[in-house]
Amino acid sequence: MLKKFWDWILDSIRIDEDIALHENRIFWIVVLVPFGFIFWLFFSLTQDLILDGLYNPHVSSESLASFINYYAFPITLLTIPVTLAVMINRFHSSKQKAKSNRLVEQNNMANNFYNHYKYFIEHCEAINSRFASSEITIKPEVLYKKMFPHSSINNNVNEVDISIIDEAFKSYVSIFYNFIKHEKNVGFNGVFTEMNEYGEPTEGLKLFFLKEEFFCTLEISGLIVSTKISQEREIFIHIQNCHDLILMLVNFHGATNSIQLTNDLNNKFSEFTDKYFDERKEHITLNV
């Protein structure tokens, strides 16, 4: 019961900017309570003057002088409810202005988010047009959430999350392991590179091709890059294409950390290829 009464008091003195000034209880409290006290003071003074025989209801210079003399204090008090009402009005207007500014800021942030997302989609479409549709699949709505996980209509964060790079390199290693297992399972066919005058293969340098093509896939949330590989040296070409694609993605003009990520990505790719490939980038130096 006491809590309800306390909540009622707090609700009565609260200034709600969402409703009109005259609908706020505090406005009427600061107007009517002082007016009520002043009216009671006027009434008490008038009663005393009547009892003392000093009350003169007729309008004259003498009665006006007496009125000002006796009622000077309650008349002065009339400025209090007016002043308080003006103060409440200022507070109400100030809160409305603050809320309006917040709404404008939220609206601007939401517009910036949707514009950022729109430009990212256009960026993805431009990248997608450079590759064969059978090799790359980009889902901008999923990839955007992967690259900008902390961005929303209420929080515009335009830094690309580094996890997309880490996930890509983990996928590269997974491709290596799967390729080597596939290579051991299916074996190779050797093809002579030299032909005689009749167009028949002769002994000489052989090229080795997988008996069954390896389906090589890089998969990250919102991004799939796939191709068929028949030779080991094609692995590096695929990884290089994936690297170029991710470089294009992180070089999105709407990303605030694109320069840093580009440098980190290139350095990491260089170290990665030196570690897992031979000097000619034709064979994987990974033992399974």
Image (cartoon, rainbow, N blue to C red):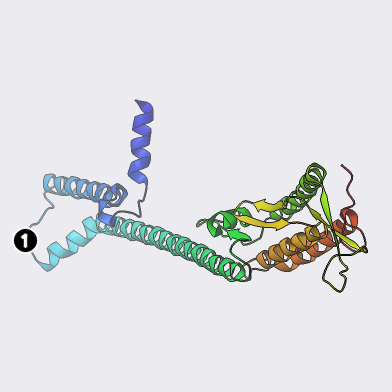
Which residue appears at 88% of the width and 71% of the height? 196
- Tell me the amino acid under the disc marked 1: His
Which residue appears at 69% of the width and 64% of the height? 245
Can you tell which quarter of the image residue 177 is in? top right
Question: Residue 261, percent across and down?
Answer: 74, 63
Question: Residue 251, percent across and down?
Answer: 68, 68
The quadrant of the rendering that contains the C terminus is top right
Instruction: Tell me if 205 is positioned left or right of 80 in this view.
Output: right
Q: What element carries label 1?
A: loop
212 w.r.t. 207: above or below: above
Residue closer to the observer: 40 or 230: 230
Can you tell which quarter of the image residue 121 is in? bottom right
Which residue appears at 9% of the width and 66% of the height? 60
Question: What residue is pinned by disc 1?
Answer: 58
Question: Residue 248, percent across and down?
Answer: 68, 68
Residue closer to the observer: 151 or 188: 188
Give the residue furthest to the top. 1
- Judge whether residue 268 can be spotted in this image: yes
Residue closer to the observer: 273 or 162: 273
Residue closer to the observer: 152 or 288: 288
Give the residue furthest to the front. 198
Which residue appears at 66% of the width and 64% of the height? 249
